Amino acid sequence: MKTHLKYQLILLSTLSFFLSANAFAENSAKEKLSFGSEFRFFIEGAIHKGGDSTENIPLYDRSSGNLVGGVALTVVGNYGGSSADKTFAHSIDAGGFIRGSLGIEIPLSEQITLSTSVGYLYDQITGDLTNGSTGKGYASFSRIALDLIGFYNMGRHRIGLGGSYHYQTRFDYIEEGDNFRLHGAYDLSDNLGSVIQYDYLLTENSSMGLRYTNIFYDFEKVVIKNKPNNASNNFSRDCLTNCSDFIDASTVSLHLTFRF
């Protein structure tokens, strides 16, 4: 069974080895390193943790043809709306899990740097259905993130404040087997969140840091495509009239940045 913990350990072990090797190579010039005042491109990888699971997203039940609310998606299966259905160990968060970004750092002065980037944030789980159908289930969160952060540089340290705009935010829920396929495509609102970030310079071209992102999504619509009867329906939920800050996607993340 694949779990997020397995992927986290592999990624963190790889990053730790790389960082240790680079830190050793740069040890002699260690105290001279500082966040420079020069134009640089960068790539960044991050692990995100936090945010809601899917309690606020109504899931479609194939047996009844209804949307079932209030069920945390800690399993993938055909739900009846109670916690007894939660028998599979995977979980998914609105704010997770892996992000890759490409960006530019623009110096405004020796101590002030403006960083802007575009990234892709994604989380997915898979599992067996729990209704005895021998089918499989999939669920995923995906979105594009545009970041704009201003940093105050203090030698090898820096701290930044800014914003992160998430758009094309989507939740997909799929059940499929030998004679059926259900796909729920959930569109969530674009939104702007706030960011606070701390970075520590490891080598001349690499740094690592922590970020807290505060952001929420509102519910827009869901399209259910249910085969073999080939039904396709657009559902409007009651929350459309009162769903401000519907899903909390706020996260804490650990990232590694390489400049070139």
Image (cartoon, rainbow, N blue to C red):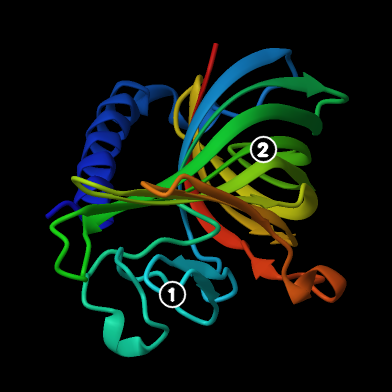
User: What kind of element bears circle 2?
Assistant: strand
Q: How many marks?
A: 2
Mark 2: which amino acid? Answer: Ala
Cα separation between marks 1 and 2? 37 Å
Q: Quick one: which residue is furthest to the front in this view?
A: 229
Q: Which residue is mark 2?
A: 145
60 to the left or right of 188: left
> Where residue 155 sits in the image (x, y, percent)?
64, 37
Mark 1: which amino acid? Answer: Ser
Q: Nearer the viewer, mark 1 or mark 2?
A: 1
148 to the left or right of 207: right
Give the residue displayed 50% in from the left and 20% down from the top: 205
> Where residue 237 sits in the image (x, y, percent)?
72, 70
Report the front residue among 74 and 241: 241
Determine whether 182 is above or below 203 in the image.
Answer: below
**Residue 34 shows in the view:** yes
Determine whether 214 is above or below 163 in the image.
Answer: below
> Where residue 109 sits in the image (x, y, percent)?
87, 25
**Residue 54 shows in the view:** no
Determine whether 201 is above or below 188 in the image.
Answer: above
Report the front residue among 98 and 196: 98
* Quadrant holding the N terminus: bottom left
Within 10 Å of the Cα at label 1, are there few (<14), some (14-19), or many (20+) other Cα atoms?
few
1 to the left or right of 122: left
User: What kind of element bears circle 1?
Assistant: loop
Kindly indicate whether the residue at mark 2 contacts the one at mark 1 (C-beta within 8 angstroms): no
Give the residue displayed 17% in from the left and 62% down from the top: 133
Q: Which residue is mark 1?
A: 64
Give the residue displayed 55% in from the left and 11% down from the top: 260
Report the front residue among 66 and 109: 66
